[in-house]
Image (cartoon, rainbow, N blue to C red):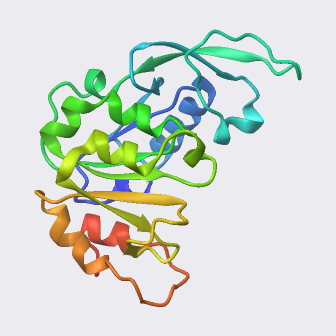
Amino acid sequence: MDFARHHRVEKRLEFEPSTLCAGIIERSYAMNDLRNVTVVTKAVGEQVGCGTMPRDARTQFSTSVRMEEQHSAADGKLFESVEVTTLDVEIPNPSGLWVTVIDVEDGELAVLRGGQAFLRTVHPLIIFEYHEVTRTHFSLDDVRAELGNDYELFRLRLDGFLDRDLRQTWNCVTVPTTSPFHVLISTLITDDRPKLSTHRSVSDALVGGNR
């Protein structure tokens, strides 16, 4: 919401496979009179197709989409079918500066693989989830292999600053060395600054805040 209302953000594209959650997101933006947001009711992955996700609305914040067909599990949990798309399909002619946030419950690498043309064209700054669960599905070397040599990889710290300690992470940031992002992010890289309680540093730098 904060990014969408910032005067330097031209547009925001969001993906949400749950029809229920997508409707809530759209109503929230409408209530705040934010008209530069498009909500796509699809999951994002490596290829176009159909997937399944748990139907229980109470767990929508932590569900993952699987490409195989599934109607119910041993615990009785029901699943619903959802559309799956790719970044390359949904953003066929990208241009300008992009900040891409990927939080798809261990499917982050699949999103990158489905957006190779997008990545090569605009070299977005990418923030993605990477923690003890995600590590069991892919490695940071896998991410580097998809992005190539034009990116630097950092840990996003709790205080909003960046460092190169990738042993224990929750979110990571990949910064394209050939874009204006590299100059902006350079002011946030630190290996010894004390951790603070704020989360605003990266966002301030990206949209032109005080830092």
Quadrant of the rendering where the C terminus is positioned: bottom left
Look at the image and tell me whether residue 34 can be seen: no
Q: How many marks?
A: 0
- In the picture as drawn, the residue positioned furthest to the right comes out as 75
At horizontal 15% and vertical 71% (from top left) the residue drawn is 183
Q: Position of residue 148 (x, y in %)?
A: 22, 45
Q: Is residue 192 above or below residue 199?
A: below
The residue closer to the viewer here, 37 or 64, is 64
Query: Position of 121 compared to 23: left or right?
Result: left
At horizontal 46% and vertical 65% (from top left) the residue drawn is 166
Query: Position of 158 compared to 117: left or right?
Result: right
At horizontal 54% and vertical 31% (from top left) the residue drawn is 22
The residue closer to the viewer here, 89 or 136, is 136
At horizontal 36% and vertical 69% (from top left) the residue drawn is 202
Q: Position of residue 196 (x, y in %)?
A: 52, 85
Query: Position of 77 compared to 139: left or right?
Result: right
Query: Position of 26 compared to 8: left or right?
Result: right
The residue closer to the viewer here, 17 or 194, is 194
Q: Is residue 120 above or below residue 189?
A: above
Q: Position of residue 149 (x, y in %)?
A: 19, 51
Q: Position of residue 154 (x, y in %)?
A: 36, 65
